[in-house]
Amino acid sequence: MYIAIPAEMLGIILPLLLGVAFLLIVEHKVMAFVQYRKGLDVVGSFGLLQPIAEGVYGSIIEGNPGNEELRANLGGR
């Protein structure tokens, strides 16, 4: 019973994450074609490392917002 719940959650979350990663790759390839740039194969094989690179870059640059920033973004004081 306790193993079934995480397995169900994994069965829902994993395809969603893979779908988003695939859509990111397709979006970048279309943008590269429209702008006449090199494709994502510069970053990795078939551009598979691009979503990982963006996630790492975003977490380094953005960091974790503090409570004050969260309250300000939500309209609190």
Image (cartoon, rainbow, N blue to C red):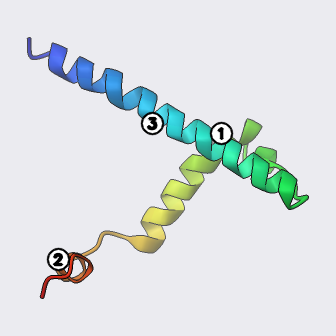
Residue 59 picture location, percent across and down: 43, 63
* Position in image of residue 17 (x %, y %): 45, 36
Kindly identify the residue that appears in the image at 91 percent across and 58 percent down: 36
Mark 1 is surrounded, within 10 Å at the Cα level, by few (under 14), some (14 to 19) or many (20 or more) other residues, namely some
Residue nearest the viewer, comparing 16 with 43: 16
Quadrant of image for the N terminus: top left
Q: Amino acid at mark 2?
A: Asn
Q: Amino acid at mark 1?
A: Leu
Please name the residue shown 50% across and 32% down the image: 18
Residue farthest to the right? 36
Q: Which residue is mark 2?
A: 67
Residue 74 % position (x, y): 21, 75
Task: Give the image location of residue 57, x and y in percent.
Answer: 53, 63
The structure residue drawn at horizontal position 16% and vertical position 20%, both measured from the top left corner, is 5
Disc assigned to residue 7: none
The residue tagged with tag 2: helix, strand or loop? helix
Q: Residue at x 20, y 23 (%)?
A: 6
Alpha-carbon neighbours of circle 3 within 10 Å: few (<14), some, or many (≥20)? few
Query: Can you name the residue that lies furthest to the left here?
Result: 1
Q: Which residue is mark 1?
A: 48
Residue at label 3?
Answer: 17
* Gap between marks 1 and 3 measured at Cα: 13 Å
55 versus 67 height, above or below: above
SS at mark 1 in the image:
loop
**Quarter the C terminus occupies:** bottom left
Query: At label 3, which amino acid type do we have?
Result: Leu
Sequence-wise first label, 1 or 2: 1
56 to the left or right of 22: left
